[in-house]
Image (cartoon, helix red, strand yellow):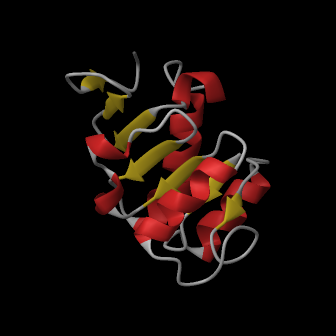
Amino acid sequence: MNILDENVLEDQRRLLRNWRVPFRQIGYEAGWKGMQDDEIISFLPGLRQPTLFTLDRDFYKRDLCHARYSLVYLDVKQLEGAMFVRRVLGHRALDTKAKRMGTVVRASHTRLVVWRLHAEQEIHLGWDD
């Protein structure tokens, strides 16, 4: 299940729907409006293998790795959110729920940086890897 944080704009939601990327957004189809970061983190393990996409850099922390969810910090402009959600979901290292679970990812124009559960170091991936 793909979850969008509240900070993902409405026009980006429309793009994802047009591209048939399934998702639920915090404050609309999941959770409630105004959820705080710690409430979102507590909420995620109760969902079925969710991947949270957010524009909030506070979610890119190694200690947030959890076997039951994935976090993706989109380190891009708000108007690029949908494109990068689609790029992350299509990347061969993250293109299934099984590959994403237990990860905290930072997606930027140049690369993906990934923390995996129990890893000692980040993994750096190019978009073509």
Please, is residue 91 above or below residue 26 in the view?
above
Quarter of the rendering occupied by the N terminus: top right
Q: Quadrant of residue 77?
A: bottom left
Q: Quadrant of the C terminus?
A: top left
Q: Give the side of residue 112 with respect to residue 38, left or right.
A: left
User: Where does residue 2 sit, x and y in percent of width and height?
Assistant: 66, 49
- Between residues 10 and 32, which one lies in front from this camera angle? 32
Tell me where residue 75 appears, x and y as whole percent: 32, 53
The reply to whether residue 108 is in sight is no
Q: Is residue 121 left or right of residue 106?
A: left
- 69 in relation to 119, above or below: below
Name the image quarter holding residue 11.
Answer: bottom right
Image height of 62 relative to 96, above or below: below
Q: Count the marks.
A: 0
Residue 101 appears in the picture as rendered: yes
| Nearer to us in this view, 100 or 106 | 100
- At x 63%, y 75%, the residue is 10
The residue at the point 35 percent across, 56 percent down is 59
Q: Is residue 19 left or right of residue 94?
A: right
- Residue 47: give x, y in percent of width and height: 70, 50
Image quadrant assignment for residue 48: top right
Identify the residue at image location x=36%, y=46%.
Answer: 64
Q: Position of residue 71 (x, y in %)?
A: 46, 46
The residue shown at (44%, 46%) is 72
